[in-house]
Image (spheres, rainbow, N blue to C red):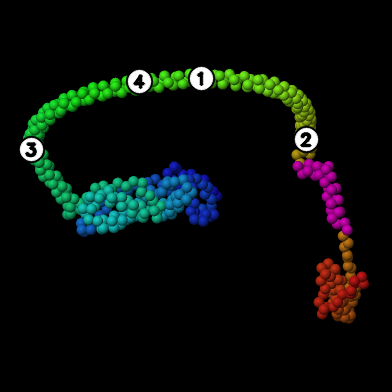
Amino acid sequence: MASFHVTDASEYLAITGWGIDDVKLAKKAWVFAGQQCKKFCISPVNYEFEVHALSAEKLPFILPAVFTIGPKITASGGAEADKKELEAQLLLYAKLIAPLDTSTSHVHELVEGIIEGETRVLAADLTMEEIFKGTKTFKEKVFNKVQLELNQFGLVIYNANVKQLVDVPGHEYFSYLGQKTQQDAANQAKVDVAEARMKGEVGAKERDGLTRQNAAKVDAETKVLSVRQMGQGLKEELAMKKAGWDKQAKVAEVEAAKAVAIREAELQMEVERKNAMRQTEKLKAEQLSKATVQYDTQVQQSNAQFYSRQKAAEASLFEQMRAADARKAQADAKFFEQKMGEDARLYAKHKEAESLALVGKAKTEYVASMLQALGGNYHALRDYLMIDAGMYTEMARINAGAVSGMQPKISIWTNGSGGGGDGAGGDQAAAGNALQQMSGLYKMLPPLLSTVHEQTGMEPPAWMGTLKKDDAA
């Protein structure tokens, strides 16, 4: 009815059938009846091609390439959208490519067709020279175009190795181009060697002449410069000596003027110091007397204020200590009361749990002994327990309460008695019985209609008759 399937690391399960809308992909799953399971590999496969194409000049060439292609199983980011896109790509691969055997030519032809088509379209817009010189750009364009086409099959190019372009037999364009390049390189090398040799010989002669000219010029300039430096040195020496003499004269003048000013300042400071000392002594005497009186007064006031504040602080501290002691005692008492209450409740819970455990154990032993005494008869034990618990009595009481207050009404009617006859009166008796049966049927209708009316409130149609109205109504 069901089987459990597990795949290798490089495989997936594609499950279809009952309970699955489209295709379910999984690494392991239960496969039930009405479902089909196919295991497919997601390992990349190498495809090697030789693509034949034409350039814009209608020149044929061969592009050897090796592509490593497989299903897309890695996302570029960790976002939820990337994961959904990855699942969609893998689902496309499971639907379109996985049913085909990768070892057959079907997938190879599919990939080769895409690569040849995109390569030919790109090559048709480029000349052979552009293709040859821009081989890297050409490879990238082929890679991008092929990847766009493979996206619709859930495939991705893991690696693409496009080799050098190859000539088609009978069209040796690249061979001639290579020979031309080699010949151009050889000729250019010969020209470069001759030009280098010529430049070397001419340059050597030029360097020799320039060296001699520069040496003579440097010698002449050196001599002129040395004479100028000697004359400049003498001028600077005389200027320095003159500046020194001027400096000494000015310093002497400044020192004399400063000495006079300093002496005048010292005398003026001495006069001012004497005046200041005299004024200071006078102010000291006046301020000392005032300060002494003010100090004595403030000391007495401060002592009085300090004493009153100290007493107030001591009283406040005493009150706070008493209040703190009272709060602590109250808190201790409340904590002790709560602790005793919690201990009592815990002890009660513990005893209650022990009693329940003992009752349960006793009931278990009682039931086991009763079942053993009844010979293992579970039904007999059940009936005994129900009788012992009074369940049958309770059920009878509940049923009696359910029917109490009901007032059933029973209607009795009779069709009368019919007589039989023998002999010549048999036909008449049979006719009489038929009439009696019809009469009995009509006699039955009134009580039947009355009962229906009482139970449902429905009345008979007018053509059948009317019921007798209740006197209470």
Q: Residue at x 87, y 75 (%)?
A: 467
The amino acid type found where label 2 is placed reads: Leu
Q: Which residue is mark 3?
A: 202
Amino acid under disc 4? Ala
Residue 341, position as x, y percentages in the image: 79, 31
Which residue is at 43% across, 48% downward?
A: 40
Is 18 placed above or below 338 here? Answer: below
Mark in front: 3 vs 2: 3
**Is label 3 in a helix, a strand or a loop?**
helix
What is the secondary structure assignment of the residue under circle 1? helix
Residue ID for mark 1: 273
Vertical order, 199 against 3 (above or below): above
Of residues 74 and 38, the one nearer the viewer is: 74
* Residue that mark 2 sits on: 356
The span from disc 3 to disc 2 (Cα, nearest Å) is: 123 Å
| Highlighted magenta segment, given as a residue range | 378-405
3 or 2: tag closer to the N-terminus = 3
In this figure, which residue is indicated by the disc labeled 4?
256
Q: As rendered, which of 386 and 174 lies closer to the eye?
A: 174
C-alpha separation, residue under disc 4 versus residue under disc 3: 79 Å
Kindly indicate the quadrant of the structure image that contains residue 53: bottom left
From the top left corner, tell me how far across and down residue 443 is, in percent.
87, 74
Q: Quadrant of residue 236?
A: top left
Which residue sits furthest right? 471
> Do residues under tags 4 and 2 come within 8 Å of each other at their CB atoms?
no
Note whether 434 is above or below 77 in the view shown: below
Separation of marks 4 and 2 at Cα, in angstroms: 122 Å
